[in-house]
Amino acid sequence: MKHFINLSLKQARRVVVTVIGATVLIIGIVFIPLPGPGLVGIFAGVAILATEFIWAKRLLKRMNQKAGQVRDTITGTTRPKASDTSK
């Protein structure tokens, strides 16, 4: 019985995280052409989904890498690659 309760709580948590994450993500997408924090909503939605899903965690990692590249391009700075730091 205890196992069933733990399993049910995990599934309920996953459903709640999915609904909240998807809602924030959709709101972020809607705000891209409208005035509002569209990119922040997209990042937040993916970050929420990344707490439960591996695909979202990988997507968030790629989004962070691309954001870092854009930041470096705008500021004119360069950062060492991950392979360069392991000397």
Image (tube, grey):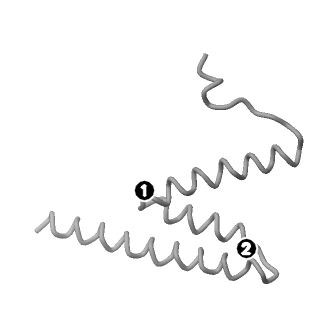
Q: Closer to the camera, 77 or 52?
A: 77
As measured in the structure, the alpha-carbon distance from the residue carrying label 1 to the one carrying label 2 is: 23 Å
* Residue under the point 51% across and 53% down: 58
Rendered residue at 20%/69% (across/down): 5
The amino acid marked with disc number 2 is Gly
- Residue 12 to residue 79: above or below: below
- Residue at the location (65% across, 51% down)? 64
Front residue of 5 and 71:
71
Quadrant, the C terminus? top right
Which quadrant of the figure has residue 78? top right
Question: Tag 1: Cα neighbours inside 10 Å, few (<14), some, or many (≥20)?
Answer: few
Q: Quadrant of the N terminus?
A: bottom left
Which of the pair 45/33 is nearer the observer?
A: 33
What residue sits right under mark 1 in the picture?
A: 54
Q: Which residue is mark 2?
A: 38
Please report whichever mark, 1 or 2, sits nearer to the chain's N-terminal start: 2
**In the shown orientation, is residue 69 left or right of residue 24?**
right
Q: Which mark is residue 43?
A: none
Taking the spot 81% from the left edge, 43% from the top edge, the residue there is: 72
Q: Farthest top residue?
A: 87
Q: Position of residue 50 (x, y in %)?
A: 49, 59
**Depicted 54 relative to depicted 8: above or below:** above
Q: x%, y% of residue 70? A: 78, 50
- Structural crowding at the residue carrying mark 2, measured as other residues with C-alpha within 10 Å and reported as few (<14), some (14–19) or many (≥20): many
Q: Is label 1 in a helix, a strand or a loop?
A: helix
